Every structure is written in structure tokens, then in C-alpha cells.
Image (tube, helix red, strand yellow):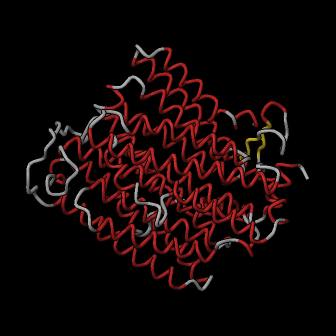
Amino acid sequence: MNALVVVPVVVPLLAAALCMLVGRSRIAQRAVSITALTASSAASVAVLVAVDRDGTLVVDAGGWGAPLGIVLVADRLAAIMLAIATVTLLLVLLYAIGQPGAERNHVGFQSSYMVLSAGVALSFLTGDLFTMFVGFEMMLTASYVLMTLGGTRDQVRSGMTYVVISLVASVLFVTALALIYTAAGTVNLADLSERIPLLDEGVQRAIALLLLVVFGLKAAVFPLFFWLPDSYPTAPSPVTAIFAGLLTKVGVYALLRTQLLLFPPETRPDTILLWIAGLTMVIGVLGAVAQKDMKRILSFHIVSQIGYMVMGLALFTVAGVAAAIYFIVHQVVVKTALFLTGGLVEHVGGSSRLNRVGGLLGSAPVVAVLFLIPALSLAGFPPMSGFVGKFALLDAGVGDASYWVVAAAVVAAFLTLFSMTKIWAGVFWSPKEREPVGDAQPVGRLGGPALMVLPTAALVVITILLGVFAGPVYDVVTRAATGLLDPAIYRAEVLGS
């Protein structure tokens, strides 16, 4: 079973190389990529089942064990994130193949997408901070290419902003690595969980805050989110969808992993994290309410929903962390589905501006349904997965007596519902006020090409299943949260002592 842990990292990298070798054949590239991500998805689901049943899987690269060597560690949190990420990556790839545009017109799409997939998997599985940095850089380098596919002026401008911010985050990450290694003599996460608590409390707090800035910038928390709403909407729809669904969640995963594993309760920045969570929720949703473009509204909601995840982390309780993990899984699926639906709206309506698209409920009812279900989930309507996640977070907040952040979460939820209603009224219900700038495509029976509609529908079905089977899923995330809050478990599994 340990061999399956490396599949989501190694197979996409081999596929990227093979895609470059067969670059003249679009069919061969697609076959290689789909096969690679199908294998990665199957391996990831198998790893999740095995880890939840038998415990953490550890793979020593080159036979060198921790803390000297590079290790891949699949505990429950990593396995959960890996499984939902690989399945989402596969579905978005199918959508990209079905959509006229970026994937068909650019020979480098498939290879870049495979490198992105490998980087995401490595970021989740790595057992040391330096390899996490390598995973981030693989992911970000591929994302630079994918974001600027098409080369329009807006894409290049937004892409430059994204590149500059990412480079700043990378420099801060390298600086943090240097300081941590100087202070503790290691970058292995399990080893650090023993050594950091032995350092001076001031040094511990400084390291915790530095890692909070590094991963907070990647997660787009307040006030470090300013780059996201301008960068994401200009990319091709499948690229925006995978960025919205996964890339910021990698930053949240890194926050969960480092803050819970490395630092004892007395040096955790819990108060700062609570303030960041509340402000991220409220400022993000206020930005969404002010927008008049579907993609920009959804982009601000990425920021707002990150606040809920940070809220769960900031409580530092089993209930809060379990709710945060469940909410991350819900958000990966729902956000990806909403942005893919946004691509369908552009395809059949010619624009994503609310006043240039209208009446799609009558002309494209399938697209309307594909938007409505994840939109209701995002707003927290019962019995959708969004309701389960938000209720769990509110319950954990009340249990911790953090009433003001609970109030902020409730306000953000109502404003989220308002902005989703705004999209529904503008795009699907009301007639359009102005003609779109782009060309609308024939709607067809499904509301678009089958390879665009079916992957979106699959994500919508997963959203429904997360709500229907919330009990079993929540049992798994609770076990993951329990393990995260006891660093001794992680140390014993990785270091063997």
C-alpha cells in the first residue's frame, strides 16, 4: 500500500514529460493526461481508505528515514485532501478538453496541468518544510503558464500581479526555512514538533507569525488577499476553477499542518487568527456584494469562505478543526463547480457580466440547475454540505465562547445568500439589459458541450453526497482533527518513537 502514496506525485510528472514528447498529437496528450489523473485519483482514494482503517502511511525516499531523508506522510488530513484534490483535477481536465479555447489552442496546457497536479499532491504529502516549498514552487510555476494562456492584455497584467505576489511569498518562505533551520537544526515536521517547543517562547511566536504570513498570503486571508480578485477572473474558466477550488486550500492546509503540529498552545497566535478569520469573512463577502460580474463575485467569495476555515483552526479544538477540514472539502467541490458553471454561462451567454447575460433559466435550464445547487450549498442552505460545515463551525465557536466571530460568520452567510441571489436574478431570471461583447454559442440539449456539462454535474453530485452522507464523512474528519491536535501521534508514526 505504501507504493500507492507516491503515485499522485510521480505519475503526473512522468505524464508531463510524455506530453511534451508527444506534443504534436493532441489526442495522445489527452490520453496520457486522463490516464495519469485517473490512476492518481484511484490511488488517492485507496490511500484514504487504508489510512483511515490502518493508520498513517510513511514512505522514505531513497531509503533514508526521517529526519535525515525526505519522507512522504499520508495521515488522515493529507489523505483526505489528496483524494478530493485528485478527483477534482481529473474532472476539471475533462471540462477543459470539452471547452473550446485554452486546452485546444496551446500545446503546453497538458504538461503544465500535470506539473500542477504533482505539485499539489507533493504539498499535501510531504513530511518536511523544504519539500513543501518545492511542491509549492512546482504548483506555482505551472500556474504562471496556465494563468496567461491566451495572452490577452488583461491576462498578462493580472498574471504579472500573481507572479509578483507569488515570488514575494516564495522569498518569505525561503527566509522562514533559513530561520527555522538556524534555530532548530532541522526542517522535518515531525522533528520540528519536538524541537520548537524547546526554543525560547519569543522565538516560537516569531516563527509562528512568519509561517502565518507565508501561508496566509498563499491562502489569501485578510489583509493579504488583494491580489486574488483581479488575478483569477481573467484566466480560462477551467484554470480559474482549479485555482479557486484548490490553490488557496493548499495554503490553508499548510496553516493547519504547521500551526497545529509545531507550536504548543501557549505560543499559538489564536487571537490573531480569530481576528483574521472574522475580517476575511466579512471583507471578502462585502467585496462580492459590490461586484457586477459573476466571476468577480465568485472570486471575492473565495476570500470570504477562507475565513470560515481559518476560524475553525483558530479555535484549536477538535470540534473547530474537524469543522474546518469538512468545510475545506466542501469548498473544494463547491467552488470548482461554481466556476465551471461560470464557464458554461460564458459559453452560452457570451459574457459573465450580470447585465449582459439574462434569461438563461429558460434557454439553458441545465446550466441554471448546475448553478443553483452549489450556490445554495455555498450560502449554507440545509441539508447541503455548506449548511453542515457552517453549522459545525458556529457550534464550535459557541462552545469556545467566541461569540463575536460567530456573529461575523452569520453576517457573512446572509450576505453570501444575497450575492448568490444577485447572480441568479441577473444571469438566469431577468432579461439581459445589454448585448454581450463575446459570441454566445449554441445552447444544445445539455446547455453546452457534454464534456463541459458532465464534469460539472459530477461535482454537483459530489456536493449533494457530502450533505447526504455528512455523518460518515464527519466521523473521518473528526478522527483527522483528533490526530492533528496530538503531535505525539504524528511523531511516533514518522520517527518511529
**Outermost residue to the left:** 434
Give 202 or 458, whichever is nearer the viewer.
202
**107 with respect to 496 (left or right):** left
Question: Looking at the image, which residue is at 34% across and 42% down?
Answer: 235
Counting from the top left corner in percent of width and height, residue 296 is at: 30, 56
Query: Is 317 above or below relative to 14?
Result: below
**104 with respect to 32 (left or right):** left
* The N terminus: image quadrant: top right
Query: Is 496 above or below relative to 4?
Result: below
**401 with respect to 383 (left or right):** right
Counting from the top left corner in percent of width and height, residue 478 is at: 66, 64
Numbered marks: total: 0
Q: Is residue 335 visible?
A: yes
Question: Looking at the image, which residue is at 24% across and 56% down?
Answer: 293
Query: Is 139 above or below relative to 374?
Result: above
Counting from the top left corner in percent of width and height, residue 168 is at: 52, 50
Say which quarter of the image contains residue 201: bottom right
Give 236 or 153, whichever is nearer the viewer.
153
**Outermost residue to the right:** 497
Question: Looking at the image, which residue is at 49% across and 67% down?
Answer: 307
Say which quarter of the image contains residue 282: bottom left
Counting from the top left corner in percent of width and height, residue 268 is at: 69, 71
Q: Is residue 490 visible?
A: no
**118 with respect to 385 (left or right):** right
Give 186 or 454, whichever is nearer the viewer.
186
Question: Looking at the image, which residue is at 74% across and 33% down?
Answer: 3
